[in-house]
Image: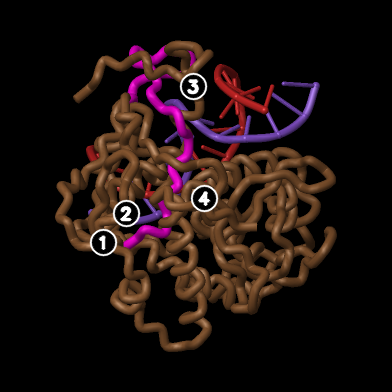
Chain colours: A brown, B purple, C red
Amino acid sequence: MTLSSSTIQESASHHRTYSRKQKSLGLLCSNFLSLYNRDGVEPIGLDDAASRLGVERRRIYDIVNVLESVGVLARKAKNQYSWKGFGAIPKALEELREEGLRENFHTFDSNNSAKVDDEDERFSNPNTGSQQDKSNPSSKLNLNVFFTDNRREKSLGLLTQNFVKLFLCSNVDLISLEEAARILLGDGQNSSIMRTKVRRLYDIANVLSSMNLIEKTNQTENRKPAFRWLGMRGKSENGSLSVLNLNESKKRTFGTEITNISFKRNKMASSVEGNSNQNTKMQWQMQVKHENLENGIERSDFEKGPKQSSKSYQFGPFAPVSVQDTVRQVRDWESLASTYRPQYHSQALRDLFAHYMEAWKTWYSEVAGKEPIQIS
DNA sequence: AATTCCCGCCATATC
DNA sequence: GATATGGCGGGAATT
Protein backbone atom coordinates (compact mmCIF):
# COMPACT_ATOMS: atom_id res chain seq x y z
CA MET A 1 0.00 0.00 0.00
CA THR A 2 1.01 3.56 0.16
CA LEU A 3 4.30 3.08 1.71
CA SER A 4 5.17 6.11 3.61
CA SER A 5 8.36 5.95 1.74
CA SER A 6 8.25 9.57 1.11
CA THR A 7 11.91 9.27 1.24
CA ILE A 8 12.17 7.84 -2.15
CA GLN A 9 12.80 11.33 -3.09
CA GLU A 10 15.17 11.65 -5.89
CA SER A 11 18.49 12.73 -4.66
CA ALA A 12 19.13 16.38 -4.30
CA SER A 13 15.65 17.30 -5.07
CA HIS A 14 13.08 19.54 -3.78
CA HIS A 15 10.57 17.89 -1.80
CA ARG A 16 7.10 18.79 -2.77
CA THR A 17 7.30 21.35 -5.45
CA TYR A 18 4.99 21.55 -8.31
CA SER A 19 6.55 19.73 -11.14
CA ARG A 20 5.37 20.14 -14.61
CA LYS A 21 6.71 16.80 -15.61
CA GLN A 22 4.32 14.82 -13.60
CA LYS A 23 1.46 16.51 -15.26
CA SER A 24 2.65 16.11 -18.76
CA LEU A 25 0.57 14.70 -21.51
CA GLY A 26 3.27 12.23 -22.22
CA LEU A 27 3.18 10.74 -18.79
CA LEU A 28 -0.56 10.77 -18.78
CA CYS A 29 -0.50 8.96 -22.06
CA SER A 30 1.84 6.34 -20.68
CA ASN A 31 -0.48 5.76 -17.81
CA PHE A 32 -3.42 5.64 -20.11
CA LEU A 33 -1.75 3.05 -22.24
CA SER A 34 -0.66 0.89 -19.39
CA LEU A 35 -4.14 1.07 -18.06
CA TYR A 36 -5.83 -0.10 -21.20
CA ASN A 37 -3.20 -2.03 -23.01
CA ARG A 38 -4.94 -5.25 -22.36
CA ASP A 39 -6.75 -7.82 -24.28
CA GLY A 40 -10.05 -7.24 -22.69
CA VAL A 41 -12.44 -5.68 -25.09
CA GLU A 42 -13.78 -3.45 -22.43
CA PRO A 43 -14.91 -0.25 -24.05
CA ILE A 44 -13.15 2.76 -22.75
CA GLY A 45 -15.26 5.43 -21.22
CA LEU A 46 -13.90 8.91 -21.07
CA ASP A 47 -15.18 9.59 -17.63
CA ASP A 48 -13.81 6.35 -16.41
CA ALA A 49 -10.42 7.09 -17.86
CA ALA A 50 -10.42 10.56 -16.46
CA SER A 51 -11.17 9.43 -12.97
CA ARG A 52 -8.90 6.43 -13.12
CA LEU A 53 -6.06 8.60 -14.24
CA GLY A 54 -6.96 11.42 -12.00
CA VAL A 55 -7.12 14.15 -14.53
CA GLU A 56 -9.72 16.40 -15.86
CA ARG A 57 -11.73 15.23 -18.74
CA ARG A 58 -10.32 17.77 -21.07
CA ARG A 59 -6.96 16.04 -21.01
CA ILE A 60 -8.43 12.74 -21.97
CA TYR A 61 -9.70 14.27 -25.16
CA ASP A 62 -6.23 15.31 -26.08
CA ILE A 63 -4.79 11.88 -25.63
CA VAL A 64 -7.64 10.02 -27.15
CA ASN A 65 -7.55 12.13 -30.24
CA VAL A 66 -3.98 11.48 -31.06
CA LEU A 67 -4.17 7.84 -30.14
CA GLU A 68 -7.06 7.47 -32.48
CA SER A 69 -5.12 9.15 -35.22
CA VAL A 70 -2.62 6.39 -35.09
CA GLY A 71 -5.07 3.58 -34.83
CA VAL A 72 -4.63 2.63 -31.23
CA LEU A 73 -8.15 3.64 -30.40
CA ALA A 74 -11.36 3.92 -32.30
CA ARG A 75 -14.25 6.07 -31.37
CA LYS A 76 -17.23 3.89 -31.00
CA ALA A 77 -19.79 6.25 -29.70
CA LYS A 78 -20.23 9.26 -27.59
CA ASN A 79 -18.09 8.97 -24.58
CA GLN A 80 -16.85 5.63 -25.69
CA TYR A 81 -13.78 4.33 -27.41
CA SER A 82 -12.57 0.88 -28.13
CA TRP A 83 -9.06 -0.30 -27.71
CA LYS A 84 -7.46 -1.40 -30.93
CA GLY A 85 -4.01 -1.82 -29.59
CA PHE A 86 -0.53 -1.26 -30.84
CA GLY A 87 -1.09 -3.92 -33.38
CA ALA A 88 -3.27 -1.52 -35.27
CA ILE A 89 -0.51 0.98 -35.70
CA PRO A 90 1.25 -0.53 -38.70
CA LYS A 91 -1.83 -0.55 -40.78
CA ALA A 92 -2.84 2.90 -39.75
CA LEU A 93 0.58 4.24 -40.58
CA GLU A 94 0.64 2.52 -43.88
CA GLU A 95 -2.59 4.17 -44.80
CA LEU A 96 -1.30 7.49 -43.69
CA ARG A 97 1.78 7.05 -45.76
CA GLU A 98 -0.13 6.22 -48.89
CA GLU A 99 -2.51 9.01 -48.25
CA GLY A 100 0.36 11.33 -47.69
CA LEU A 101 2.13 10.34 -50.83
CA ARG A 102 -1.06 10.80 -52.72
CA GLU A 103 -0.89 14.33 -51.56
CA ASN A 104 2.15 16.46 -51.69
CA PHE A 105 3.58 15.30 -48.49
CA HIS A 106 6.76 14.15 -50.00
CA THR A 107 7.64 17.13 -52.05
CA PHE A 108 9.50 18.97 -49.45
CA ASP A 109 12.81 17.26 -49.44
CA SER A 110 15.96 18.60 -47.99
CA ASN A 111 15.77 22.16 -47.00
CA ASN A 112 12.83 24.43 -47.00
CA SER A 113 10.29 25.11 -49.63
CA ALA A 114 7.51 23.07 -50.94
CA LYS A 115 4.46 23.64 -49.01
CA VAL A 116 2.27 20.75 -48.42
CA ASP A 117 -0.96 22.20 -49.36
CA ASP A 118 -3.04 21.30 -46.43
CA GLU A 119 -6.52 20.48 -47.43
CA ASP A 120 -7.88 17.35 -46.03
CA GLU A 121 -7.77 14.22 -47.94
CA ARG A 122 -10.96 12.94 -49.43
CA PHE A 123 -13.76 15.22 -50.24
CA SER A 124 -15.41 14.34 -47.04
CA ASN A 125 -18.01 17.01 -47.12
CA PRO A 126 -21.43 15.83 -47.98
CA ASN A 127 -21.39 18.20 -50.85
CA THR A 128 -22.80 20.93 -48.69
CA GLY A 129 -24.16 22.57 -51.71
CA SER A 130 -21.99 24.42 -54.11
CA GLN A 131 -18.78 25.84 -52.91
CA GLN A 132 -15.74 24.82 -54.68
CA ASP A 133 -13.87 27.92 -54.05
CA LYS A 134 -10.59 26.51 -53.05
CA SER A 135 -9.31 29.68 -51.60
CA ASN A 136 -9.93 33.03 -52.91
CA PRO A 137 -7.22 35.50 -53.62
CA SER A 138 -5.16 34.42 -50.71
CA SER A 139 -7.44 35.96 -48.21
CA LYS A 140 -6.54 34.49 -44.95
CA LEU A 141 -8.92 34.17 -42.14
CA ASN A 142 -12.28 35.73 -41.59
CA LEU A 143 -15.20 35.22 -43.88
CA ASN A 144 -15.34 31.51 -43.60
CA VAL A 145 -15.42 30.99 -39.97
CA PHE A 146 -19.14 30.91 -40.12
CA PHE A 147 -20.39 27.68 -41.41
CA THR A 148 -17.39 25.77 -42.25
CA ASP A 149 -16.21 22.52 -40.92
CA ASN A 150 -12.98 24.13 -39.94
CA ARG A 151 -13.48 22.11 -36.89
CA ARG A 152 -11.98 19.02 -38.35
CA GLU A 153 -9.40 20.96 -40.22
CA LYS A 154 -7.93 22.30 -37.07
CA SER A 155 -8.30 19.22 -34.99
CA LEU A 156 -5.51 17.73 -33.04
CA GLY A 157 -6.19 14.47 -34.72
CA LEU A 158 -5.65 15.72 -38.21
CA LEU A 159 -2.62 17.66 -37.16
CA THR A 160 -1.22 14.49 -35.71
CA GLN A 161 -1.73 12.61 -38.91
CA ASN A 162 -0.17 15.30 -40.97
CA PHE A 163 2.76 15.48 -38.63
CA VAL A 164 3.24 11.76 -38.95
CA LYS A 165 2.92 11.91 -42.70
CA LEU A 166 5.82 14.27 -42.70
CA PHE A 167 7.98 11.46 -41.45
CA LEU A 168 6.42 8.63 -43.34
CA CYS A 169 6.67 10.33 -46.64
CA SER A 170 9.92 11.97 -47.60
CA ASN A 171 13.26 10.98 -46.28
CA VAL A 172 13.97 13.55 -43.67
CA ASP A 173 14.20 12.00 -40.30
CA LEU A 174 14.73 15.00 -38.17
CA ILE A 175 12.22 17.75 -37.93
CA SER A 176 11.83 20.55 -35.49
CA LEU A 177 8.36 21.46 -34.48
CA GLU A 178 8.74 24.85 -35.95
CA GLU A 179 9.69 23.44 -39.28
CA ALA A 180 6.78 21.09 -39.12
CA ALA A 181 4.44 23.90 -38.34
CA ARG A 182 5.81 25.94 -41.18
CA ILE A 183 5.45 23.11 -43.60
CA LEU A 184 2.01 22.05 -42.53
CA LEU A 185 0.89 25.58 -42.48
CA GLY A 186 1.13 27.88 -45.33
CA ASP A 187 4.49 29.40 -45.53
CA GLY A 188 3.53 32.89 -44.68
CA GLN A 189 1.77 32.42 -41.44
CA ASN A 190 2.35 35.01 -38.87
CA SER A 191 3.42 34.60 -35.33
CA SER A 192 0.12 34.01 -33.66
CA ILE A 193 -1.01 31.22 -35.91
CA MET A 194 2.41 29.73 -35.79
CA ARG A 195 2.73 29.84 -32.07
CA THR A 196 -0.55 28.12 -31.53
CA LYS A 197 0.27 25.46 -34.04
CA VAL A 198 3.58 24.82 -32.43
CA ARG A 199 1.94 24.52 -29.07
CA ARG A 200 -0.25 21.80 -30.48
CA LEU A 201 2.70 20.07 -31.99
CA TYR A 202 4.35 20.00 -28.63
CA ASP A 203 1.32 18.28 -27.23
CA ILE A 204 1.29 15.77 -30.03
CA ALA A 205 4.99 15.18 -29.88
CA ASN A 206 4.72 14.38 -26.22
CA VAL A 207 2.20 11.66 -26.64
CA LEU A 208 3.86 10.23 -29.71
CA SER A 209 7.04 10.18 -27.73
CA SER A 210 5.44 8.26 -24.93
CA MET A 211 4.59 5.63 -27.47
CA ASN A 212 8.09 5.78 -28.77
CA LEU A 213 6.97 6.55 -32.23
CA ILE A 214 9.24 9.53 -32.19
CA GLU A 215 12.11 10.69 -30.12
CA LYS A 216 13.44 14.05 -29.21
CA THR A 217 16.99 14.89 -30.04
CA ASN A 218 19.02 17.68 -31.38
CA GLN A 219 19.95 18.50 -34.86
CA THR A 220 23.52 17.50 -35.31
CA GLU A 221 24.75 20.91 -36.13
CA ASN A 222 22.20 23.29 -34.93
CA ARG A 223 21.88 21.78 -31.55
CA LYS A 224 18.32 22.77 -31.95
CA PRO A 225 15.78 20.34 -30.62
CA ALA A 226 14.03 18.22 -33.18
CA PHE A 227 12.22 14.95 -33.43
CA ARG A 228 13.18 11.76 -35.11
CA TRP A 229 10.85 9.09 -36.27
CA LEU A 230 11.32 5.79 -34.53
CA GLY A 231 8.55 3.78 -36.02
CA MET A 232 9.36 2.11 -39.24
CA ARG A 233 10.03 4.08 -42.28
CA GLY A 234 7.50 4.24 -44.97
CA LYS A 235 8.69 1.82 -47.51
CA SER A 236 10.06 -1.50 -46.51
CA GLU A 237 13.61 -1.03 -47.48
CA ASN A 238 16.40 -3.22 -46.39
CA GLY A 239 18.58 -2.31 -43.55
CA SER A 240 19.02 1.22 -42.47
CA LEU A 241 15.71 1.99 -40.94
CA SER A 242 16.48 2.11 -37.30
CA VAL A 243 13.64 0.64 -35.48
CA LEU A 244 13.86 1.47 -31.91
CA ASN A 245 16.08 3.53 -29.84
CA LEU A 246 16.49 2.40 -26.34
CA ASN A 247 17.94 5.01 -24.23
CA GLU A 248 18.55 4.92 -20.60
CA SER A 249 15.23 3.75 -19.43
CA LYS A 250 15.44 0.37 -17.96
CA LYS A 251 13.08 0.19 -15.16
CA ARG A 252 9.66 1.34 -15.76
CA THR A 253 7.89 2.97 -12.99
CA PHE A 254 4.58 4.48 -13.16
CA GLY A 255 5.23 7.16 -10.75
CA THR A 256 3.27 10.24 -10.08
CA GLU A 257 0.01 10.70 -8.54
CA ILE A 258 -3.04 9.42 -10.07
CA THR A 259 -5.39 11.71 -8.39
CA ASN A 260 -4.38 15.22 -8.69
CA ILE A 261 -7.23 16.72 -10.43
CA SER A 262 -7.23 19.59 -8.18
CA PHE A 263 -4.05 21.18 -7.89
CA LYS A 264 -3.00 24.24 -9.43
CA ARG A 265 0.12 25.11 -11.09
CA ASN A 266 1.83 26.83 -8.26
CA LYS A 267 0.43 24.72 -5.59
CA MET A 268 2.62 22.24 -4.01
CA ALA A 269 1.65 18.70 -3.95
CA SER A 270 0.72 17.46 -0.60
CA SER A 271 2.42 14.36 -1.62
CA VAL A 272 5.84 13.73 -2.71
CA GLU A 273 6.61 12.82 -6.16
CA GLY A 274 7.72 9.30 -6.19
CA ASN A 275 8.81 9.12 -9.71
CA SER A 276 12.31 8.44 -10.53
CA ASN A 277 12.26 7.43 -14.08
CA GLN A 278 10.20 9.70 -16.07
CA ASN A 279 8.98 8.25 -19.19
CA THR A 280 7.44 4.95 -19.43
CA LYS A 281 8.64 3.04 -22.31
CA MET A 282 5.94 0.62 -22.74
CA GLN A 283 5.08 0.23 -26.21
CA TRP A 284 5.20 -2.67 -28.42
CA GLN A 285 4.04 -5.01 -25.85
CA MET A 286 0.59 -4.86 -27.20
CA GLN A 287 -1.16 -8.10 -27.03
CA VAL A 288 1.13 -9.70 -24.61
CA LYS A 289 -1.06 -11.31 -22.10
CA HIS A 290 0.11 -10.85 -18.62
CA GLU A 291 2.73 -8.77 -17.24
CA ASN A 292 4.01 -9.07 -13.80
CA LEU A 293 5.43 -6.49 -11.62
CA GLU A 294 8.59 -7.54 -10.09
CA ASN A 295 12.15 -6.72 -9.66
CA GLY A 296 15.00 -8.30 -11.43
CA ILE A 297 12.91 -10.50 -13.52
CA GLU A 298 14.28 -13.76 -14.52
CA ARG A 299 12.93 -14.45 -17.84
CA SER A 300 14.19 -17.88 -17.27
CA ASP A 301 10.97 -19.54 -16.49
CA PHE A 302 9.89 -19.97 -20.00
CA GLU A 303 7.00 -22.13 -19.08
CA LYS A 304 3.83 -20.53 -18.11
CA GLY A 305 4.49 -20.29 -14.45
CA PRO A 306 1.24 -18.52 -13.83
CA LYS A 307 2.98 -15.98 -11.82
CA GLN A 308 0.65 -13.97 -9.87
CA SER A 309 0.22 -11.14 -12.19
CA SER A 310 -1.06 -8.11 -10.54
CA LYS A 311 -2.59 -6.97 -13.70
CA SER A 312 -3.42 -3.54 -12.48
CA TYR A 313 -0.50 -1.32 -12.19
CA GLN A 314 -0.60 0.91 -9.29
CA PHE A 315 0.94 4.01 -10.52
CA GLY A 316 -0.21 5.86 -7.56
CA PRO A 317 1.53 8.68 -5.89
CA PHE A 318 4.23 6.38 -4.83
CA ALA A 319 4.71 3.73 -7.30
CA PRO A 320 6.81 1.09 -5.74
CA VAL A 321 10.12 1.75 -7.24
CA SER A 322 10.48 -1.91 -7.61
CA VAL A 323 7.57 -2.03 -9.87
CA GLN A 324 8.76 -3.08 -13.14
CA ASP A 325 6.45 -5.01 -15.18
CA THR A 326 7.88 -7.12 -17.76
CA VAL A 327 6.37 -9.26 -20.22
CA ARG A 328 7.06 -12.74 -19.47
CA GLN A 329 5.95 -16.08 -20.35
CA VAL A 330 5.99 -15.04 -23.91
CA ARG A 331 9.30 -15.89 -25.28
CA ASP A 332 8.53 -17.55 -28.46
CA TRP A 333 8.19 -14.48 -30.51
CA GLU A 334 7.79 -16.34 -33.66
CA SER A 335 4.73 -18.09 -32.47
CA LEU A 336 3.45 -15.00 -30.88
CA ALA A 337 3.85 -13.23 -34.12
CA SER A 338 2.02 -15.83 -36.05
CA THR A 339 -0.64 -15.97 -33.47
CA TYR A 340 -1.38 -12.35 -33.53
CA ARG A 341 -0.30 -11.42 -36.95
CA PRO A 342 -3.16 -9.60 -38.50
CA GLN A 343 -4.25 -10.91 -41.77
CA TYR A 344 -2.45 -8.43 -43.87
CA HIS A 345 -3.07 -8.92 -47.47
CA SER A 346 -0.14 -7.12 -48.93
CA GLN A 347 3.43 -8.09 -48.56
CA ALA A 348 4.23 -4.57 -47.64
CA LEU A 349 2.12 -4.70 -44.57
CA ARG A 350 3.60 -7.98 -43.60
CA ASP A 351 6.97 -6.37 -43.72
CA LEU A 352 5.81 -3.56 -41.57
CA PHE A 353 4.53 -5.97 -39.06
CA ALA A 354 7.81 -7.77 -39.14
CA HIS A 355 9.57 -4.60 -38.29
CA TYR A 356 7.40 -4.12 -35.33
CA MET A 357 8.01 -7.59 -34.12
CA GLU A 358 11.65 -6.80 -34.30
CA ALA A 359 11.11 -3.80 -32.17
CA TRP A 360 9.20 -5.76 -29.64
CA LYS A 361 11.91 -8.32 -29.35
CA THR A 362 14.48 -5.67 -28.81
CA TRP A 363 12.42 -3.88 -26.31
CA TYR A 364 11.63 -7.04 -24.49
CA SER A 365 15.16 -8.22 -24.14
CA GLU A 366 16.10 -4.83 -22.97
CA VAL A 367 13.52 -4.68 -20.28
CA ALA A 368 14.08 -8.24 -19.29
CA GLY A 369 17.47 -7.02 -18.38
CA LYS A 370 19.11 -9.68 -20.37
CA GLU A 371 21.79 -7.97 -22.16
CA PRO A 372 21.90 -4.31 -22.87
CA ILE A 373 21.46 -4.59 -26.50
CA GLN A 374 22.30 -1.35 -27.96
CA ILE A 375 21.11 -0.47 -31.27
CA SER A 376 23.37 1.66 -33.27
C1' DA B 1 15.69 35.25 -22.58
C1' DA B 2 13.82 31.46 -25.02
C1' DT B 3 11.49 27.24 -25.09
C1' DT B 4 8.19 24.04 -23.55
C1' DC B 5 3.46 23.17 -22.85
C1' DC B 6 -0.24 22.87 -18.74
C1' DC B 7 -4.63 24.69 -17.62
C1' DG B 8 -9.07 25.64 -18.27
C1' DC B 9 -12.13 29.29 -20.51
C1' DC B 10 -15.64 29.05 -23.54
C1' DA B 11 -17.17 28.28 -28.53
C1' DT B 12 -19.33 24.28 -31.04
C1' DA B 13 -21.26 20.07 -31.80
C1' DT B 14 -24.45 16.56 -30.08
C1' DC B 15 -27.68 14.63 -27.59
C1' DG C 1 -31.17 23.19 -22.73
C1' DA C 2 -27.93 20.13 -21.16
C1' DT C 3 -23.96 17.71 -22.05
C1' DA C 4 -20.01 16.27 -24.78
C1' DT C 5 -16.11 17.93 -27.51
C1' DG C 6 -12.16 20.19 -28.11
C1' DG C 7 -10.00 24.88 -30.17
C1' DC C 8 -7.09 28.15 -28.36
C1' DG C 9 -3.73 30.96 -26.14
C1' DG C 10 -2.26 33.07 -21.49
C1' DG C 11 1.36 32.65 -18.87
C1' DA C 12 4.01 29.65 -15.56
C1' DA C 13 7.66 26.12 -15.43
C1' DT C 14 11.96 24.80 -17.63
C1' DT C 15 15.90 25.22 -19.96
Residue at mark 3: chain: A
Residue A149 screen position, x and y as percent: 51, 59
Chain assignment, label 1? A
For the residues labelled 2 and 3, say whether their Cβ atoms are less than 8 Å apart: no
Left or right, A375 with reference to A332: right
**How many angstroms separate mark 4 from mark 2 (CA)?**
14 Å
How far, Cα to Cα, is label 1 from label 3?
A: 41 Å
Q: Residue at point 26% right, 15% down?
A: A4
In this rendering, the answer to whether A99 lies above or below A323 is: below
* Disc on the earlier residue, 1 or 3: 3
Q: With respect to residue A147, does B3 lie above or below?
A: above
Looking at the rendering, the stretch of residues picked out in magenta corresponds to A260-287
From this viewpoint, is residue A178 visible? yes
Give the chain letter at badge 4: A
Left or right: A132 in relation to A264: right
User: In the rendered structure, the residue with mark 2 lies on which chain?
Assistant: A
Asked if the residue under mark 1 is in contact with the one under mark 2, i.e. CB atoms within 8 Å, the reply is yes
For the C terminus of chain A, give its image quadrant.
bottom right
Question: Is the Cβ of the residue at disc 4 closer than 8 Å to that at disc 2?
Answer: no
Amino acid at pointer 3: Ser
Can marks 4 and 2 be said to lie on one chain?
Answer: yes
| CA–CA distance in space, label 2 to label 3 | 35 Å
Sequence order check, earlier mark of 1 and 4: 1
